[in-house]
Image (cartoon, rainbow, N blue to C red):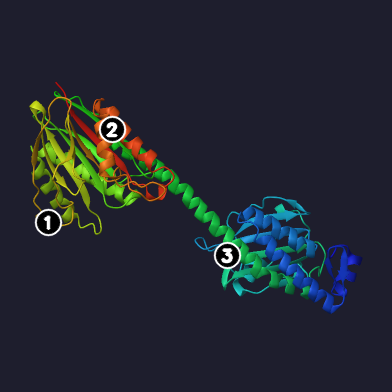
Amino acid sequence: MIDGGPAENAAGQGHGGLMVGDELATDAGERQLAWMRLLVETTDDLSSTLRIDEVLEKVADRVQSLINCQFFCVMLWNDRREVLETAFSKRFDERFDLDAKDGFPLGYGISGSAAAARRPQRVGNVARDPRYVYLTQAEVDVRSELAVPLLARDRLVGVLDLESNDYDAFTEEHEQMLASLGSRIAVALENARLYEQVSEGQRRLSADLAVAREVQKALLPDRAPAVSGFDLGFAYVPARTLGGDFYDFLTYPDGRVAVAVGDVAGKATPAALYGSLSVGMLRGHVVEQLCEPDAMLSRLNEQLCKAGLDDRFLAMAFALLDAGGKVRISNGGLPAPYVVRSDRVEQLPLDGLALGIEPGTRYGTRTVELAPGELLVLCSDGLAEGRDRSGAMFGSSRLSRQLQELAPGGAQAIADELVQGAARYAAGNESQADDRTVVVIKATD
């Protein structure tokens, strides 16, 4: 290290010495070799972390191992405020917080001048330089200063500022060394800052998604309604924090209950928003008039088409429960509903175009009569299309067998076991995971 004592400074600086380890390199060739080795070591050291506070600490250690100074500071450029803000400062080898809330604009002080000119500013006697800004907090009797801009691909990242209580403490060699080191410091700081911005963005996104998840959960029913002649159960497991599937139970003004299961194309936030929009539209239609299932899908389809949301569409089944175990159902793109009889499981040959694609689409309606103990099951494609580790699909046949085994149980127990069974099958292959939603309608005595 080039020491700060007057006699040693004269020896070290006068001979152009560079301390590497415990040895003083005085020959020009030795100094160049030592400096190149130090550049490589510094680059490796600075690239070993992406935490900005750790990078700043390493910068301080490296610079102060080369040049003795009583005050060391790194200021980072704030693009939004257009000022240099203090990020790290040390005095007499101890860390301290320099309170400079207003920051340094370009051209203000010696540091601001270095930033504006984009070249080092070396001042042997600050008392003779009108640009010098005296900071009482530093508690250093400053006599000389060296400010070096930190540039990454010609972009201003900040300024490295050194101050000493000796006159002419900083030499041309110091200036050249820090100028060479500056680009490496700038890249390390820029990478660390970008990393922290991304990390902060991810933290905010996680918090926002958690709130959105709670809102979505509040929007969907938390229990199935009691309906005379039917036992209802449901299960819903989103593949991500937010899901594109939804289910709903809607009570008509005449007391009848309708069941809806939807699956929005896509995943995560856009799909969840589209699903929430669809639920809102559904509930609005129920309040307005008594829609039969086919009319409900047609009306919702027209509204979604008018919304003009490109690359978004909705697969949905809508069922209306009547007395005597009768269910009228229409389907627009959802997997064909399953009917579980005492002796067989079948899928209704009922399909239609997904909603939000083609205006004027018409939908068919089927009436299903369920005897006590028989089931009608509506589900999104996440159940049957789940894949195991080998890529084999769960499939409608496996789902049918599972339904036959579960049929004696209650509707809620059946729904829970359906999604849990599909999850167990797809365990270890989460890349193929999709939202899983099921509503079970079981006729009772």
Task: Give x and y (percent) for residue 315.
Answer: 21, 48
Residue 66 visible here = yes
The disc label shown at residue 105, or none = 3
Residue 100 visible here = no
Q: Quadrant of residue 39?
A: bottom right
Q: Secondary structure at mark 2?
A: helix
Q: Quadrant of residue 329?
A: top left
Separation of marks 1 and 2 at Cα, in angstroms: 34 Å
| Of labels 2 and 3, the one closer to you | 2
Separation of marks 2 and 3 at Cα, in angstroms: 64 Å
Task: Give the labeled residue for mark 1.
Answer: 359
Task: Relative to 10, say whether 437 is above or below.
Answer: above
Between 54 and 9, the one nearer to me in the picture: 54
* Residue at point 56%, 58% (across, down): 193
- Which residue is most to the bottom? 28
Quadrant holding the N terminus: bottom right
Task: Give the labeled residue for mark 2.
Answer: 415
Mark 3 nearby-residue class (10 Å; few <14, some 14–19, many ≥20): some
Mark 2 nearby-residue class (10 Å; few <14, some 14–19, many ≥20): many
> Given the image, on which type of amino acid does mark 2 rest?
Ala
Does residue 304 appear left or right of residue 169 in this picture? left
Q: Earlier in the sequence, mark 2 or mark 3?
A: 3
* Residue at point 22%, 53% (across, down): 313
Task: Relative to 31, say whether 346 is above or below.
Answer: above
Q: Quadrant of residue 19?
A: bottom right
Mark 1 nearby-residue class (10 Å; few <14, some 14–19, many ≥20): some
